[in-house]
Image: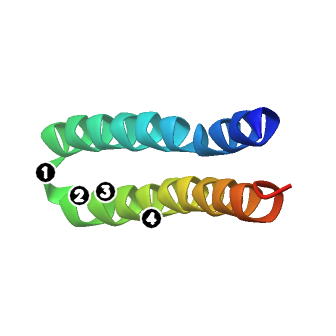
Amino acid sequence: MGLVAIGAAIAVLTGVGAGVGIGIATAKATEAIARQPEAKKDIRSAMLLGCVLAEATAIYGFVIALLIIVMLGGK
């Protein structure tokens, strides 16, 4: 069970990368909007698309962690 828990923990670490990525994207988008307020709509659209893709990565890691626990946890 110990190795299963370690594998699941490693899979869940994708959430850290997603959090950092979303934070950086938001910071850069805020800076860009401050510099060019007229491009606010385009900047926001690009930022949201990037955030969605980063969050999808975190969700995939979470699903893999759950699969590891369910499929290998009982053995």
Check residue 53 in the rendering and tell me which mark sits there, or answer none. Answer: none
On screen, residue 31 versus residue 60, left or right, reads left
Q: Mark 2 points at which residue?
A: 39
Q: Name the residue under label 1.
A: 37
Residues at circles 2 and 3 in contact by the CB criterion of under 8 Å: yes
Residues at circles 3 and 4 in contact by the CB criterion of under 8 Å: no
| Nearest to viewer (mark 1 / mark 4) | 4
Q: Name the kind of residue labelled 4 in the image.
A: Leu
Check residue 43 in the rendering and tell me which mark sits there, or answer none. Answer: 3
* Disc 1 from disc 2: Cα separation: 5 Å
Q: Which residue is drawn at 67% across and 53% down?
A: 65
Report x, y in % for residue 36: 19, 45
Tag 4 or tag 3, which sits nearer the N-term? 3
Q: Name the kind of residue labelled 1 in the image.
A: Pro
| Nearest to viewer (mark 2 / mark 3) | 3
Judging depth in this view, the residue of 27 and 8 nearest the camera is 8
Q: Name the kind of residue labelled 3 in the image.
A: Ile
Location of residue 63 (image quadrant): bottom right
Tell me the SS state at disc 1: helix
Q: Is the C terminus in the top left, top right, bottom left or bottom right quadrant?
A: bottom right
Location of residue 62 (image quadrant): bottom right
Residues at circles 1 and 2 in contact by the CB criterion of under 8 Å: yes
